[in-house]
Amino acid sequence: MNLHLWNNAVRALLVAGALLWSSAPVVAQFGAAIDEDSASMPDHRITANGTHNGQPAFIVRSHLRLSWKDILIEGSGGGRCDLVLEDAGQLSVANSRLAVRGNIYFREGGTLRLVDTDCSLLNSIPREHHYWFEGGTLYTERCSIGGSENANGASNVSGIWLNRGLWRAVDT
């Protein structure tokens, strides 16, 4: 078993233990497992279709399936664009690399389903962007999820704030 897989297994056990015994919101921070070079991305670029908390956002309100090789969600000119999964909004991504230059919000009833996909938040500095669970669901199967790496190879970690909602991880 390589070191990367072992580290992710240990992190998953720590998060699971914290979820079982903690009544407070759980915050987990993961470094990137993805070699991020935004100059080589994307196959497909998605930009804002609305705003959330005063920031540009790509808001998913219905069922949307994406299977492009590389998907980048960012604002115009390469700026911030949050991904917001609203009530009954479901985004399914398979066999891809999903990069978001902003936060991901899992609102009540919203779902992000990732299968064989690497998902990263493109942070300029550590903890710039986060995964915010506000009653929604994240389903991951054979995925890596986290922050990004800077040009020097150092991790820019992202927080995972599981305040309310569900993360079902299978081989992640």
Image (cartoon, grey):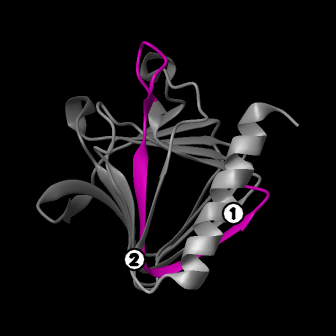
**What residue is at 36 percent from the left and 54 percent from the top?**
130
**What residue is at 27 percent from the left and 51 percent from the top?**
48
Query: Considering the image in quadrants, where does the N terminus appear?
Result: top right
Quick one: 39 or 126, which is closer to the camera?
126
- Secondary structure at badge 2 equals loop
Q: Amino acid at mark 1?
A: Leu
- Find disc 1 in the rendering and name its residue: 13
How many numbered circles are shown?
2
**What residue is at 59 percent from the left and 65 percent from the top?**
15
Q: Which residues are magenta?
A: 149-172
Q: Is residue 172 visible?
A: yes
- Find disc 2 in the rendering and name its residue: 25
Q: Position of residue 34 (x, y in %)?
A: 59, 32
Q: Position of residue 70 (x, y in %)?
A: 58, 35
Magenta: predominant secondary structure element? strand
Q: Position of residue 43 (x, y in %)?
A: 54, 30
Quick one: 147 or 94, which is closer to the camera?
147
Q: Is residue 86 above or below residue 139?
A: below
Q: Earlier in the sequence, mark 2 or mark 1?
A: 1
